Each structure stands twice: as C-alpha cells, then as structure tokens.
Amino acid sequence: MTVHTVTIEDDGSSYRCSDALSLLEGMESLGKKGIPAGCRGGGCGVCKVQVLSGSYTKRVMSREHVSEQEEAQGCVLACRVRPSSAIALRVIGKMKKNVCRVVEPKDVLSPSQLEIKQETTKWQ
Ligand code: FES
C-alpha cells in the first residue's frame, strides 16, 4: 500500500490517500471535505472531478456521468478512482456550486437591503 497526496485546487486543501482507497473514500476517512459525496458507488455523478495532474486507476464509470470526451480530459468520478501518484484535481460535479462557490461582496445584501427584500417578498 502506498499513500499519495491529493490536492483540491478549488480550495487549495490537500489530504493523503492510500492507493487502496478511492479519492472520495480517502478524503472521507480523514473527515475532510472538498469533493462532494453522493451515492459513493458511481451512480449519481456528484463526485465528478477533473484530474489536472497525476496518475490513477479507475473502475468502470457510467457514460451518463462521464462522456468519452470528458474522460479523455481527465474527468472522473472520485468514488471510482484510486491514486497511483500525487494527484491535483478540481471539482466539477453537480454540487460544486454549493460546496466551492466563492461569495462575492456584490452577492451579500446589507441589513437594510435584506429588510427591503423581505418586505417586497411579503407583498408578492
Ligand atoms: S458519489 Fe455518486 S458517483 Fe461518486
């Protein structure tokens, strides 16, 4: 068994993952977050990532979630892939927006804007 470093480029975090575990299992076994988890069995596509560097072994992945073209570009399901070297990846699964979204100052309402918005919502 060999352990490799996995870096999640979206948030700059990293963790150590055994080559006996999938990228998702390795992350979860350490209680870490970063790659969204769903079914953990290749069925939902939530854990989809793009491997930017490094090598891995993969199990069969549904074409419903990873097309041949995407696979050629390094897109994989993190629950179906085990690292065989250090890996750098970015999250591209369905939940990315919720997990990795950066809140811009323009997205944050001031308390007075929030009050107006709530009042407006009441009357609609
Ligand atoms: S968690 Fe559902 S496909 Fe990986």
Image (cartoon, grey):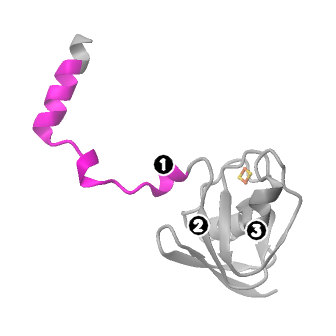
- Residue 38 is situated, as x and y percent measured from the top left of the image, at 67, 48
Instruction: Out of 4 and 64, give the one closest to the viewer.
Output: 64
Please tell me in which quadrant of the rendered image residue 75 appears: bottom right
- Asked if disc 3 is less than 8 Å from ligand 1, the answer is no
In the image, which disc is placed on residue 90?
2
In the image, which disc is placed on residue 98?
1
Q: Name the secondary structure under disc 3.
A: loop
The span shown in magenta is 96-120
Q: Name the secondary structure under disc 2.
A: strand
Which SS type dominates the magenta stretch?
Answer: helix
Amino acid type for the residue under numbered disc 1: Asn
Relative to 65, say whether 48 is above or below.
below
Residue at 70 percent of width and 69 percent of height: 23
Q: Residues within 10 Å of mark 1 (few under 14, many from 20)?
A: few
- Residue 24 is situated, as x and y percent measured from the top left of the image, at 69, 64
Q: Name the residue under label 3.
A: 22
Q: Name the secondary structure under disc 1.
A: helix
The alpha-carbon separation of the residues under discs 1 and 2 comes to 14 Å
In the rendered image, the quadrant that contains the N terminus is: bottom right
Q: How crowded is mark 2: few (under 14 residues within 10 Å), some or many (20 or more)?
A: many
Q: In this view, does 53 lie to the left or right of 114?
A: right
The question of residue 16 being in magenta is answered with: no
